[in-house]
Amino acid sequence: MRLPSLAALPAAAVLAMLPGTAHGLAPDAREPAVRPVPVAPPASGPLAGLLPSVPLPPVPRPTGSLPTGPRPDEPLPEYRFTGAGFDACSAPPLEALSVWHTASPYGAVNIYSSGGQRACSQGRLTPQWVAQVRAMGWQLVPTHVGLQAPCAARPDKPLRIDPDRAEEQGGEEAAEAAQALQTLGLGPGSPVYLDMEAYPSGDAECSRAVVDFTAGWTRALQEAGYRSGFYSSMDSGIADIVAAAQAGYSPLPDAIWYARWDGKPTTTGQAGLPDDLWTGHRIHQYRGSANETYGGVTLSVDRDQIDGLVAGGS
């Protein structure tokens, strides 16, 4: 049976989909160095007065593959960038980035740092490439492409989240992502954004699985000393994560990257994304698949406006 999307449900229905005893997201016991995501319930509307407090059992941890994070008493550094950025399917050639850093309006570029369902090869993406790109002055936005929503219709990304193991799988993906950051020389406090491609709305179990998966992803990354990012369409993954935030659940991603190709290079005033959530921890992908030429060098890119978290060095 197809049910309404999580974002459109009243509070009672949200709780039914994300019950504290089985699928709810446990409050984060850590003292985050990054500004916490506001989780106070709204003063009015269907979610007013919602104060969930039932914790979950701990998410099973991956065996032996998660990098060790800093001591709990050591605050994580936070790396921020405000300005124009772009993402490309493959890590661009160094020569192209050298030209674009001077000739283009961009100051940040994403890298598909890990994940078994990346669309393009990443033959150039090495620790040496990362070091040279950072030396040019570029900011980096690490991105992980792994398991997708159970209801996603993506033949090119056939591997899906198992709703019964969603949190555990999120932790497993986080271990891979954290190891990749460490290998590339991107240090503690760096974010990595989980790429959750658009999926159909209206499937309550699918929405719940995405939220559960993201909770496991977030918890494991934070424990490893990194920060959790989440990329998705405004109409699917972001809508579901916003609904979970408004319901008061945690852990939630430290940063979000939302796709709405409205042509507006802004990070606020977005319908469906209240300005008091993830303030200063946002990226807006506002145009996709554009060929752009600067200094005689052409790249195919998606355009982003950034007021949020980027990677730091080791």
Image (cartoon, grey):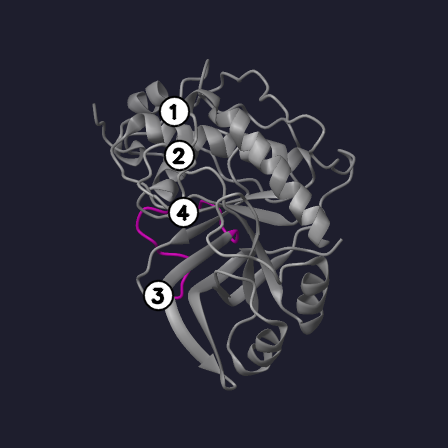
Q: Residue at coordinates 36% horizontally, 32% vertically from top-left?
A: 150
Q: Earlier in the sequence, mark 1 or mark 3?
A: 1
Q: Callout 1: helix, strand or loop?
A: loop
Would you call the spot at circle 3 few (<14 residues within 10 Å), some (14-19), or many (20 or more)? some
Give the CA distance from mark 2 to mark 3. Answer: 25 Å
Q: Which residue is mark 4?
A: 232
Q: Earlier in the sequence, mark 2 or mark 3?
A: 2
- Are discs 2 and 3 less than 8 Å apart at CB? no
Q: Which residue is mark 2?
A: 246
Q: Amino acid at mark 4?
A: Ser
Q: Earlier in the sequence, mark 1 or mark 4?
A: 1
Location of residue 165 with respect to 120 vertically, above or below: above
Percent from the top left, x then y, of residue 19?
Answer: 41, 18
Q: Callout 4: helix, strand or loop?
A: strand
Would you call the spot at circle 2 few (<14 residues within 10 Å), some (14-19), or many (20 or more)? many
Q: Earlier in the sequence, mark 2 or mark 1?
A: 1
Q: Amino acid at mark 3?
A: Lys
Camera-near label (4 vs 3) is 4
Residue 189 in sight from this viewpoint = no
Q: Is residue 60 magenta?
A: no
Q: Which residue is mark 3?
A: 264
- Give the magenta part as a residue range: 264-281
